Every structure is written in C-alpha cells, then in structure tokens.
Image: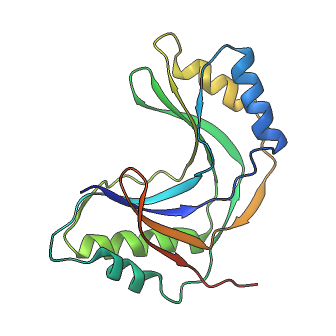
Amino acid sequence: MKSYLEVKVPIEVNAPWFEELRKKMDEHHISVRWQNGFHHITVVFINEEPAAISLECVLGECLEGRVTPSLTFDKVDVFSISPCRYIVYLTAEHPSNEFMALVKDVRDAVRMTGCNFDNNFRLHVTLGRVYDENIGIEQLRDITNSIAVPSFTLRLPEVRYMEYRFKERASWMLLSTT
C-alpha cells in the first residue's frame, strides 16, 4: 500500500501573492485545479512497506522530541510531472537546516526498514495542477516568475502519516520552540 509522510503548511489562500497568481492564471485562460486546503510538503512517499514493519512506530520514534522546524518561503514555480501535466508550487530557495535534518532523518529511518520509496525529494508545496495539451512549461514559468512572493516564515509543527488517497494513519505535533 502506498503511503506518505507530510508536514502540514498553513498557507493563507487570501495572501496577496496567491490571489495575484490565481488572477494571472485566469487572465491567461489557464485552467488550474487549485489545491483546496490540504497544503503540505511530502517528506517521503512510500511505494510499499514490509508487512512486519510498523512505520507508525518507526516514524513516531524518529519524530519524538523533535523541535518544530521553520521554513522561509519565497518563490512560486512550476515543474512537469508528465507531458501536458504540471504542478504549480511554493518553495523555499534556502531551506532551514532544521527542516532538512528532519527530512534526512525521516528518510534514513524509512530506508532502514527496507521500504521501497521514491528517492527524489523536491521541497515544494503544491498550490495547483494544470492538465492542458496547449500549454508548455515555459508559458507557465513566465507567469510564476512574475509573481513577487514576499519572504515569509512559517513554523511547521504538524506531521501526518497518510495512506495514499488521504486516509490518516498517525499524526504528531512537534515541540514548539516558542
């Protein structure tokens, strides 16, 4: 069964930069399926896990006592997931060491269990998806590059372990530093 560990990201959908992004996509007649609420960063996507392993326990041990990381988001961009299918996303060009240590530790713990998981990690928060044969990544990137995202820092205390298709298996609140 496919599953993933995500760090929730409390994006303000009414933030001026996000409203400007949606407006520009509309002006260019680009249909975007906007992510509705569930903004997160997928730390690890697990294709299959050994039956004898309780990933909830492994992940709980890895996250126990962990200080809440922060990230400073500062850029909107786009990448292609297949021909004519794109992800519009928010990212942090210079992620914090505490966040990247969390990612590394989680992925190392999952690796030690023998799970089959996707090796690529791209720090991104999906904002929306575009499925259109008439649009290229260059056109989308021109639009995303025109959005001035003012740097903003968020603390990310909530971590969830989910089965693919949004069924929560476990959740944790990391320790706050404030």
Where residue 67 sits, quadrant-wise, is: bottom right
The residue shown at (16%, 69%) is 50
Among all residues in the image, which is located at the extreme bottom? Answer: 65
43 lies above or below 29: below
The residue shown at (39%, 86%) is 61
Drawn side of residue 75 relative to residue 39, left or right: right
127 lies above or below 69: above
Color scheme of the displayed model: rainbow
Q: Nearer the viewer, residue 114 or 161?
A: 161
Drawn side of residue 119 relative to residue 151, left or right: left
Spot occupied by residue 104 in the image (x, y as percentages of width and height): 43, 70
Spot occupied by residue 42 in the image (x, y as percentages of width and height): 47, 57
The image shows a total of numbered marks equal to 0
Spot occupied by residue 96 in the image (x, y as percentages of width and height): 63, 67
Which quadrant is home to the N terminus?
A: bottom left
Drawn side of residue 177 relative to residue 165, left or right: right
The residue shown at (45%, 12%) is 133
Among all residues in the image, which is located at the extreme top? Answer: 134
Q: Nearer the viewer, residue 134 or 3?
A: 3
Q: Nearer the viewer, residue 90 or 163?
A: 163
The residue shown at (63%, 59%) is 9
Among all residues in the image, which is located at the extreme front? Answer: 167
Spot occupied by residue 106 in the image (x, y as percentages of width and height): 40, 73
Which quadrant is home to the C terminus?
A: bottom right
Where residue 97 sits, quadrant-wise, is: bottom right
